[in-house]
Amino acid sequence: MKTQIAIIGAGPSGLLLGQLLHNAGIANVIIERQTPDYVLSRIRAGVLEQGMVDLLREAGVSQRMDEEGLVHDGFELAFDGRSEHIDLKGLTGGKTVMVYGQTEVTRDLMHAREAAGATTYYSASHVQPHDLKGEQPYVTFEHNGETLRLDCDYIAGCDGFHGVSRQAIPAGVLKEFERVYPFGWLGILADTPPVNEELIYANHERGFALCSMRSPTRTRYYVQVGSDEKVEDWSDERFWDELKARLPAPVAARLITGPSIEKSIAPLRSFVVEPMQYGRLFLLGDAAHIVPPTGAKGLNLAASDVSTLYRILLKVYGEGRTDLLEKYSEICLRRVWKAERFSWWMTSMLHRFPDTDAFSLRMQQTELDYFVSSEAGRKTIAENYVGLPYEAIE
């Protein structure tokens, strides 16, 4: 088999890249080791930056998002006994975020790809990219008991942190940067109405809490827990009691509880590899970088990687601009590190660390107070939260 772009991974980044390329007449094949149902079972992010919303619209897969997604003009920061509203729309010249679950984004992209008749191999095993520095890279894999070879011009590694793409790069080529945080997020999904119209990020002496949502009838709540905690030790009742304890009293009083339909603990880490490419292999999304979820940047960073590679490939195939390929990593990393900084800042400001002493606590409270008491500080938070602009490809 032969195609122009081989895409490893059928998560939202691989599917979005595939849809954009297909619409532009650039042939691509997606190879995914899991089943479609498994991919859709992942409960992940739900806050989309303005840039990702625009990219989904450009890809022609935004109809359901625009009908069912919740546009948010701002969010709340609760700390030190107060609640501060961050007016995203007013502080960024009209930009907003969209609350629309990653599962739904993935479902929309799957349906669009199926409708387009584009090729996807699910349940593929022993996936392996080859000849990455050569002129004719290829990917081998097994599907339905048959060993297949896919020849291509370029390979997009969209297969996540544990995928084969990054592992296919020889040892010593990549430089890794990592910070593992000494806590996790215990999250539940429940069919209850949201406690607030906008998200609430809470810094409390008992630890961080987040009130989020997926729809007007489905909520997603989180509380900070120790890295050694086990999900089976948290009954629904214990979770709701802890969440209420960390929220401002007026918010806790109107919280509607209910049985959880999903409950899990996610560890927090910051991770980046440099460079994000090796020969004709390009790393996108979690294959190249991880952010703690505090800044709502993980899925959105993957989308900006997709936008960068897609626009480079448009010029490669449309104008012969192969010189741009070498700029992919540099362009992506400029935005990646700024998103890593914001996610690290939000995490540092809103969580209680095991070694937090009285001085550190005062610094945390003063830092938050300084930012929300200043127009410039609020604008800095807002412009990072809605997403920094995508860099033009020229």
Image: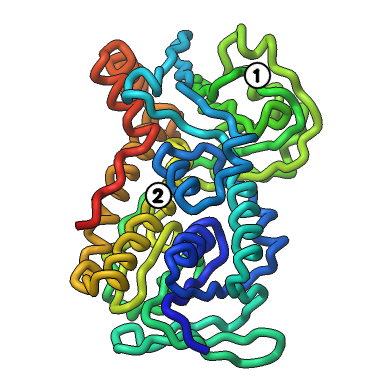
- Tell me if label 1 and label 2 are in contact, CB under 8 Å: no
The mark found on residue 195 in the picture is: 1
The secondary structure type at the circle numbered 1 is loop
Q: Is residue 175 visible?
A: no
* Residue located at (66% from left, 84% from top): 143
Q: Residue at x 66, y 92 (%)?
A: 146
**For residue 245, above or below residue 4:** above
Q: Where residue 213 appears, x then y in whole percent?
A: 62, 31
- Mark before the other along the chain sequence, 1 or 2: 1
Please name whichever residue, 261 or 7, is drawn nearer the observer in this view of the structure. 7
Residue at 60% over, 65% down: 116
Amino acid of disc 1: Val
Residue, disc 2: 301
Residue 386, compared with residue 24, is above or below; it is above
Q: Residues within 10 Å of mark 2 (few under 14, many from 20)?
A: many
Query: Vertical placement of 30 versus 217: above or below?
Result: below
User: Looking at the rendering, in which quadrant would you find the C terminus?
Assistant: bottom left
- Image x and y of residue 53, in percent: 47, 41
Query: Is 28 in front, or is 287?
Result: 28
Residue 41 image position (x, y, % from top left): 69, 54
Answer with the quarter of the image where residue 237 lies: top right
Residue 363 relative to residue 147: left or right = left
Label 1: few (<14), some (14–19) or many (≥20) C-alpha neighbours in 10 Å: many
Q: Secondary structure at mark 2?
A: helix
Q: Amino acid at mark 2?
A: Leu
